[in-house]
């Protein structure tokens, strides 16, 4: 994406959003000075996010998914894939169980040892990294360690970080998550 298109699109988006906030229409003038660079977005700023329930389907992010491989290559040489989201709080790791994909309103996804192994075969461009979300809401320390070890073993070459929990501030509002004191 060209910088000019990005700036113009962002300005139009902001102007449209602000129009809904203010009841009074105020004329405004935006002047872009494209001869100056104030800030440069890092080359690895690009990213894709997937729910744990999505990758709990075997082969979803693997060497076999040419569409996603091409998507990463088209987006750029550097970026981050984040696996987690809301469904990470409903997922569990069971190495030798059948992988199972379930939305957060269902029973909960099951990630088995084949899921991170598939992800490890994903032929991502060398500059793409992985953030993997672990279940803080209903998970156990032992389960998180087992899952983290499996993910690390399979994706070591591009693992950036583990995300522990997703939106833990919401836990007290959901009965199936941890109690306030835990």
Image (spheres, grey):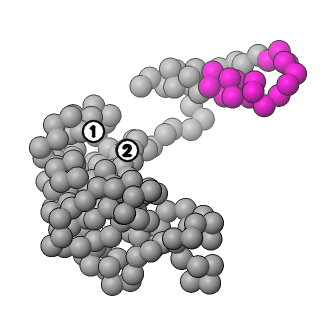
The verdict on residue 20 being magenta is yes
Residue 155 placement (x, y as % from top left): 21, 62
Q: Residue furthest right?
A: 24
Q: CA distance from mark 2 to mark 1?
A: 9 Å
The residue lying at 37 percent from left, 63 percent from top is: 107
In the rendered image of this protein, does residue 118 appear above or below residue 135? above
Q: Quadrant of the N terminus?
A: top left
In the rendered image of this protein, does residue 25 appear above or below residue 109? above
Name the secondary structure under disc 2.
strand
Query: In this orientation, does residue 31 appear?
Result: yes
Q: Quadrant of the C terminus?
A: bottom right
For label 1, the residue is: 72
Judge by depth and name the residue closer to the eye, 46 or 42. Answer: 46
Residue 26 placement (x, y as % from top left): 85, 18
Residue 75 falls in image quadrant: top left
Judge by depth and name the residue closer to the eye, 67 or 101. Answer: 101
Query: In this orientation, does residue 162 appear?
Result: no
For label 2, the residue is: 48
Residue 44 placement (x, y as % from top left): 38, 45
The residue lying at 17 percent from left, 65 percent from top is: 98
The residue lying at 37 percent from left, 44 percent from top is: 48
Judge the density around disc 1: few (<14), some (14-19), many (≥20) Cα neighbours within 10 Å.
Answer: many
Residue 14 falls in image quadrant: top right
In the rendered image of this protein, does residue 169 appear above or below residue 85? below
Of marks 2 and 1, which one's residue comes earlier in the chain?
Answer: 2
Residue 168 falls in image quadrant: bottom right
Determine whether label 2 and label 1 are within 8 Å by CB: yes
Name the secondary structure under disc 1.
helix
The verdict on residue 136 being magenta is no
Residues in magenta, as a range = 12-28
């Amino acid at each position: 994406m060209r910088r000019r298109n990005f700036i113009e699109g962002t300005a139009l988006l902001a102007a449209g959003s602000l129009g809904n906030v203010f009841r009074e229409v105020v004329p405004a003038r935006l002047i872009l000075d494209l001869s100056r660079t104030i800030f440069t977005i890092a080359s690895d700023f690009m990213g894709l996010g997937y729910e744990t329930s999505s990758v709990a389907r075997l082969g979803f992010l693997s060497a076999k998914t040419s569409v996603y491989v091409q998507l990463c290559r088209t987006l750029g040489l550097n970026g981050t894939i984040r696996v987690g989201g809301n469904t990470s709080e409903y997922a569990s790791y069971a190495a030798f169980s059948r992988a199972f994909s379930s939305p957060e309103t269902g029973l909960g996804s099951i990630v088995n040892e084949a899921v991170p192994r598939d992800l490890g075969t994903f032929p991502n461009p060398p500059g793409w990294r992985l953030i993997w979300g672990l279940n803080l809401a209903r998970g156990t320390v032992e389960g998180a360690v087992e899952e983290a070890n499996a993910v690390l073993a399979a994706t070591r070459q591009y693992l950036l970080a583990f995300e522990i929990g997703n939106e833990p501030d919401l836990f007290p509002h959901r009965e199936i998550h941890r109690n306030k004191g835990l």
